[in-house]
Every structure is written in C-alpha cells, then in structure tokens.
Image (cartoon, rainbow, N blue to C red):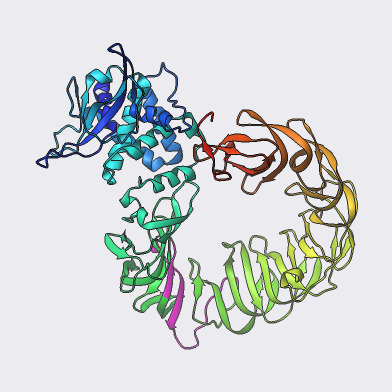
Amino acid sequence: MVVRALLIFLGLIFSPLAFPGGEYIGNGGDVLECKENGRVTSIELLDFYEARFMGRPYTIDLGEESLSVIEKVEIFLERIDRVDPERGERYRNFWSVFFDEAQIEPMDLIDIPDSGHIGVPYGCGIKQAAIHREPIRRTDKRYFIDQSFWDLLDNTNKAGLIIHEIVYREAYNLGHRNSLTVRDFVSWVTSREFSFVTSFVFQEYIYKNDLTFQSLHQGIDIRDLHITRRHPNGMPEEAEVLPGRDVFFYYKGKKLEIDADRNYDIGFHDNGHVSYAQLKFGESITVVYSGQSLKVDGFVIFYKDGNLLNGDLVDPLEVSLQGQSVTLKQDISFGPNMAYIIGADVLEAPDNMNFRVVHQPEAMALETSSLRFNEYEDVIRGNLLAPTNMYFGGHTIRGVDYFNAAWDWGKTFYFSTKEDSTIGVNGQLINFQSGRLEFHTETATLKEGTVESGTILNIRGKQVIIERVPEYDIYGLVHFHKNGIPAGFQLSRDTELYVRGDNGAHFFRRLSRVGIDSNGFVVHGQLVSPTNLNYGDITVNAVSEFNVNSGSFETEVDGVYQLETGVSVKTKKGDLQFSEGKLLSFDAHEAVPMEFQGQEIQVMQARRFTFDQFLRFKSSENLVLLASDGFYYRYPAGVTVRIYSGELVEPGSTEWRVPRGG
C-alpha cells in the first residue's frame, strides 16, 4: 500500500490537456532521466533538478538517506505545521488517502507538455512518469503512475513526488493548471534553508503565488485584497480591497457585500475570521439578543469566535437597562456571546433617569449618547450633563465632565475635569490642575496628572521641583508608579538624584525629562556634565544621556568595551548599547571580527533594537548572505545590512541576487 501511494505521486507535475475531440486527460508528472551508453545513470524529480538549473539557493534536505519515504514526508509536514498549522492539517488529510487513489503499474503514459522547463543536460530527457486527473466517478483513481520510473527513484525523490502531489492537489482546486509554481514551492519546502523561514515570509509567498484558498476567510477571495498587515502566525490582519473588485463574505449563511467604494479596510482575526468590515449600503446582519431579532448595518466588528461585537442598529431596540425600559438607537456593542450590552446610544429613557455608575455612591445625570456598560449594567464610560464630583479609592475628583473606567483595557480609570483637585500621593497632598487625571485601577492610586510649575516632590530624600511648559501639556504631566513613587517628570532646575545601578547621586539637567523606577532611582535622563556611570560590572565613560532599561548610553569620549565573544572594541564617542555588561551597539574605529551565517565578517557599525529584535550592521568588506526570501544577496562594503529572525538578513538592500556559492 505504501509503495502504491507513493507511486501515485509521480503525478505531481501536471497541467491540463485535451484530446482533439475535447476529452479531458489531466496533468503530467515529470522526472529527469539521464543515460550513458543506453543505460540509465540517474533519475530525479524535475522539481529538484529545476531548482539547481534556475540557480535557486536551495539544498534539498529531507533527513538522512536511511529514513523511509514516510518519515521523509513527515519531516515536510512538520515544517508546514510550524509556519501554517491549518495548511498542515489539510495536507495531512490529502496524505491519508493516497493509497486509495492511485493505480501503480508499468504503463506507457501519454506525454503531456505541461512542464514549461527551459533545458536539460546532454544525454538527459524529461520523461512522463505520472498523470493526474480529477475523478469523474467516486470509484475512479486520481493518479496513474509508471512503476518503471518509480522503482528507480531514491527515498528523497519518492517523498518529493508525494509532497508535490499534496501541494498540487490543493493548487488544482485553486485554479492552477500547470505545475510551475508547485515545483518551485516543493523545492523550497524540502530545502534545508526552509528551516529559517518565518510564518510571515511563508504567507507572503502563498499570497503572491495564488496558493490561498478562496473560502479560507468566510468566502473572501484573498486575491481581491492588498494585505497591509499580518498577524505573527502569518494570517492577514488588515487589508485593502483592490480597485474594481467586489468583495463578499458569509456571516451565519448570509452573503454580505463589503463597501469597497470608499477605500475602507477589512480586518481579520488570527484564525482567519473577519474582525471588522464596512458593509455596503443596504446590507445588514440579523442577530438575536435576549430573544429579540435585530438588524445591524454600517461598520461591523466581530469577536474571534464570529459573534457580533459592534454595529449600527437599523431599527430602535427596546430593552430593560438598570431596571428601566429604555430604547436604544444607532451604535450598539455586545459582550462575549452577546450575553449583555456593553455600549449604546439611548434614544428614549424615563424622564430624569439617572444612571448607576461604577464606583459611585449615587446615580448620576448623564448624556445618553455613547454610553458604555459592564456586565452588571453599571455605566463605565460617559459624559456628565454638568461638571460633577466623582470618587475613586478614597479620592475626590472635582468637576468631572467625562469619565472612562475601561481606559487602557481596564487598567486605568480616566477622568476629564473642569476644576483642580487635591490628591494624596505617597503621603503627600498635591494640587493637580484641571484637565486629565488617571488612576491605576488595581491599586486606586494616581497614575498621571498635570501639576503647576514649582510643585515639589520628594524622591529618596532628594527634593525635586517640577517645571511645566504650558504650550506642551505633556511636559506638565507627572506619571506615578502604583506605589506612589513618581515615574516621569520635567525638572525645573539642575537636580541631584540617584541612578539605578550606580554608586552615587548625579546632577541632571534643567528642563530635561527624567524617568524613575518604582524604587526611586533614575533610569533615564540627561546629565549636567559628562559623567562616568556604573552599569553592571562595567563603567561607561563620559555619559551625557542614558536609559538603563534598554542599556543605551550617549558618550562624549571614545572607549574600549568587550563583546559577548570577548573581543575588545575601540568605540567612537556617541551611541552605545549594552546587555548584561557586554557591548551590543557601537561605531568602531577598527573593523571588529564577528561570526555570522558560518562566516567571519568585519563589522564597523552595529545597532541592535531590542523592541523588535533585529540587528543592523555595516561591514568593511563585500558579503554574500542568505536572506529571508530564500535567496543569497551580495552586499557591498559599507552597505547597511539588517538581520532579523535570528540568522536571516533583510532582502532588497542590494538588488544583485546571486545563486548559492555565487
């Protein structure tokens, strides 16, 4: 059975052909056969030969030669699972029925000119090894394979045929009628280099080569979209409708058209379900809430499980809210599983109805537009009819005209105020000006507020005077940690403060904004004069500005520091970055030897950005490096090279793409 199934997959390289009378034949599967003195010296899957012939930088690798064909196919399936689990499951389903869909025996197959190859070596020829055709009857075979070719293939080539067939079966359903794309795909996914490929790069390839199922995203044809952002697993996150395309999607069995005339985006969750879309005028979705059927239209938002989150009501909806009968209109939002309403505009309510507001001792008079609720029907966001005092965590917030207890995903309680408020912070009463006040929801302590110039704070025994620049509101804001320690502010004068990780206090420049950790130590700021700072086990010389959270220092003198490899670097003054006492980012006076992709490179400049995990460097010599698209590129000396995904460089820094070893 195993041999029978594997033979089937010589039909992996196929395209349609018809007899003169119009009878459908199918697609051909080809191998490269080489002879010498009439004897066969080698036979190879066309996919593998073509990759070498075209100069593609692939090293075919499906494990040790001693592995069985089934074990080699499993290696391929595991690779696909890593970058696209849904596609991996689909391929496994195709693999599971191989044995029942093949006729494998010696046969003289009709040559089908579908390969589109350019040339072959002298003494070699392309041979028809298999034919694939879609079954007409349920009992028909799908693949017809010449066993005389199959028996000459080694296990890697047999596995390659199976992989080709798995991929082409999907591609055929997507409208592919020759195997050019499939052959390139097979040589790529069976290569050693594929182990470096990320989900994002894989999905870009799938998208560009029309290997995406039309029905993958609720019936949306991905080829009608320009994908502008992807999720980490490679699934589209945001997309634009291409000009002139009509795009539809299905929701609970109903076909809905997207408004593509006004350049609206469409969003997707990482499981492929639509996350948001603008419905075309006249389209609507029918849902059931609390036993009532209602319609929504306009801009609609969905949860990951497909349930409606937000839309515009087509007709007013009468519901019970806080024990009162009210009529809702326009924008409406639902909690998970549509179990309760979390947001709505109120069209009609009982006269003088006050609303129960989260954390407040009494009901309050609110505007009835854009209200948001929690699962207990307490209002968590709204506008007050008139400025009113509100309360939170023992604090009185004066003259509130707007509040939002769900700010920053519920981590912050936000107030907009028309009056100043005096708030206790870390045992000190501070006057905060009207504007914005934010509190940590978890601890009910102040998170952010605007103070007057001259406000005095005490930090680890040091007196700090705050400066406010009126035209820049951000410079009047003071941020606080949950324990009440100030986290960030602007200095009114040169001020001495303690630095985290250093042995003493240092003076920070007037009007500079400093950051403080929850223990009261400075983590970033500008120094009055260049100062030596201790950072872990090293001393960084003549520092003018720093951020110890990222290990970044601006220096005013040259220095000598060590890389993780132990190599000493003579650095130029300027930006330096360290991690655990070892140098990461620098400009060097002399080229520094570093190892990358198994070769020694001479680096003059390196920049590492920890927030998105890539390294940028300039070499003093020409380099040929493997990029994330699977090709090698030549990078001239002095060109900036960006590394990401650990060991891959970013393609496109130079347009000279070269084959492996070129």
Q: Looking at the image, how many numbered discs can be counted on the residues?
A: 0
Q: Is residue 522 left or right of residue 150?
A: right
Examine the rendering and report whether any part of residue 150 can be seen: yes
Q: In the rendered structure, which segment of residues is drawn in magenta?
A: 331-359
Image quarter of the C terminus: top right
- Residue at x 47%, y 34% (from the top left corner): 194
User: Would you place residue 363 above or below residue 596 in this image?
Assistant: below
Quarter of the image for residue 599 reads top right
Q: Nearer the viewer, residue 34 or 231?
A: 34
Q: Is residue 272 left or right of residue 450?
A: left
Task: Please state the horizontal and vertical placement of residue 499, each as a whole percent of the image.
Answer: 84, 51
Q: Is residue 370 magenta?
A: no
User: Would you place residue 414 above or below residue 268 in this image?
Assistant: below
Q: Is residue 220 left or right of residue 190?
A: left
Image quarter of the N terminus: top left
Task: Please state the horizontal and vertical placement of residue 165, each as a whole percent of the image.
Answer: 30, 33
Q: Nearer the viewer, residue 124 or 608?
A: 124
Examine the rendering and report whether any part of residue 339 can be seen: no
Q: Which residue is most to the front? A: 122
Task: Please state the horizontal and vertical placement of residue 23, each as a whole percent of the image.
Answer: 11, 40
Task: Please state the horizontal and vertical placement of residue 191, each as a whole percent of the image.
Answer: 45, 30
- Residue at x 44%, y 84% (from the top left corner): 349
User: Would you place residue 400 above or below residue 89 in this image?
Assistant: below
